[in-house]
Amino acid sequence: MLRTVELLIAIAGILLPGYLMARCLGLRSRHAWLAAFPFSALILVEIVIHFTIFHLPLRSIPVYSVLIIIIVVCTYFIRTGRAFSTVELPEFAEEGCGVPGKICLGFSVLLVFAVLYRSVSYPLSGYDTFFRWENLARLILQHESLDFYPPITPQDFAIYLIPDGIPPLVASVYWWFYAATNEPIQQYSAISEVLQLISAMGLTFYAAYYSFGLPAAWFSLAAFSSSALLIEGFTIGQETGFTALAVAGQFCFASVARRRPGSGAVIAAAMFAALGALARDYGPALSCAGLLVLALDKNTRRFLWLYMVTTLLLSSPWYLRDWVHTGNPLYPHGIPGGFAINEIYVAMQNSFHEKLAFYRYNFLEWCDHVGEILIGAPVAIVGVTLFRPGCRREHLPFIGLTLLVVILWLISMGDTAGGPHYSMRVLTPAFVSLTILAGAVVARLYAGDCSWLFRGLRWTTTLLIVTASVYSLSSALAHPFSPRYLLSAITYSYSGPPELAASTLELAKMLERSDVTATGVLTTDPYLGTNLLRETKFRPVMVWSPDVKFVFDHKLDPREIQRRLIAMNIRIVCYSNDDMYTPFLNHTQFFRMLLQQAPIGGAGDEALYYLNPEGSVQ
């Protein structure tokens, strides 16, 4: 009972500040709820960032205190009439919902419940969510700090294993729910995922309404709900739900400002731009969504400075802190100017970049990739193919944002160890943009003449929407498995380390049961490293940690490397024979020597080697 009360208070804390902030910016009560969660998430991550900058402990009580102050201040501005002028959003009753609208709305609600069900049954299904976002949330709860992140010293890497510099938006939201009950229960992530989805659906609807009218809004909602790849971006528990939400919010409020110029709507759009910038390190580029809408309308160009300044003020503290902490605002990415990087990690990433880069795929492979996208977002893609030449000015922001995101996706393919399909999660902001554009195109198709050609296109489009919706719902209910396994997947539940990395958990438990004395385990596998930290007395030592950089020194004799490792109490080495980093390791003298010996154990594709003091490997 107490935990339920604590969780309800946490939900109020992740909704009420953003709701009141939206009211201050001029939204009416019922519409402010659309911005309640994203604005609250932005407020929360700003608190986390500033607490980190000033080295204040990250505990629930101090953060609650700041949120209460924000609630009181916002309430004061609303009560005294000092809020911005009202931002008008349409009511359903104003133009009528109609039967098609009710069907779209009903299906969207059904889809939300399907996502909620599977997010609770099988939470945090993303491949690297386990050792990145969710793990960072646990570490904040444990250490009450973010001083170790991004990791740059051996002490940092003993806590957080990957040289990431991803902004902490997602982890902050997860930490908020964990801190509320003082227990990291993965199912709490479902609250964030569902709130993201509901907000993104509503904001996409209103963005289409303000840009192209009510029929376009309903069709855009249908296109959104029938895009399985877009929905998957919310359910994997990473940044891609927030990036989609950020773009939807920018398009919505920038379009509001275009229809009725005012500071409140522009600031709201800028807050969504900052939300995207604090979701992932490519997020700042997504601020082009609101920027393009405002720049292409002469009535809103005078607000560009307000939009850009607000976005910078809200998003820059993290990147400035990153710069001071690591020597690189986009750590660990190598950028021109001699900024600091983790040389070993970057070299290892580059070793498989060439293998996975977009230009390495042949024509047939690209046909497969494009086919996956067509199946995953058919209404959004096919609807846009009906686009007539001679697009109007209001179409350009959506086209521009889509092209930008596609470029980001192509760049990311080479850095995504999960493969081409997993890299498609980067496309979620583009899918939002395309659903709005497709809504406009399909609405115009249904409003066109009654010739046999148009009637045929309407029936075909209707069939496509229905088929895609069934597939999208099936995918949501079967997540994270293929909808072809719907009947077995829908009743399957799991929570814990990813099943794809089950062998690493088995390996960690095997070590814990063994007679081997607690020691360091040199590894490239963050799954194994995370399991070692949580389940065993052994400590993971990642190969890119600066204290073991000498392992890759070609001037050193392998025996000398081994002696140094033993002197550091690192006596076990984990080697995978089927890993993206395997070719890189095979080029080093130490690992070539290692492979000449027999392992002491293993699981899956990974083997354990023991370094004994006599200078040989067992």
Image (tube, rainbow, N blue to C red):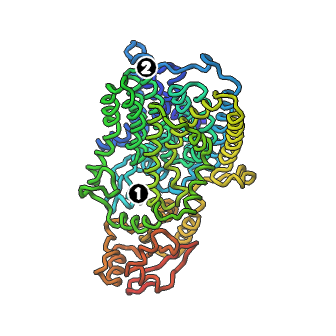
The foreground one among 222 and 534 is 222
Q: Residues within 10 Å of mark 1 (few under 14, many from 20)?
A: many
* Residue designated by label 1: 160
Can you give x and y, in whole percent of width and height, for residue 294 in the image? 38, 29
Q: Amino acid at mark 1?
A: Tyr
Relative height, residue 519 to residue 216 (above, below): below
* Residue designated by label 2: 260
What's the mark number on residue 340?
Answer: none
Residue beneath the point at 29% across and 53% down: 328
Residue beneath the point at 58% across and 52% down: 125
Q: Assign a secondary structure to mark 2.
A: loop
Query: Which circle's residue, 1 or 2, is located before the other in the chain?
Result: 1
Q: Is residue 72 visible?
A: no
- How many numbered discs sit on the rendered protein? 2
Per the model, the C-alpha gap separating discs 1 and 2 is 47 Å
Can you give x and y, in whole percent of width and height, for residue 585 in the image? 42, 75
The foreground one among 589 and 45 is 589
Is 465 situated left or right of 560 in this image? right
Farthest residue in the left direction?
337
Residue beneath the point at 29% across and 41% down: 54
Q: Amino acid at mark 2?
A: Arg
Q: Residues within 10 Å of mark 2 (few under 14, many from 20)?
A: some
Can you give x and y, in whole percent of width and height, for residue 587 in the image? 39, 78
Relative height, residue 444 to residue 467 (above, below): above
Which mark's residue is nearer the viewer, 1 or 2?
2
Q: Assign a secondary structure to mark 1.
A: loop
Image quarter (top left, top right, bottom left or bottom right) of the N terminus: top right
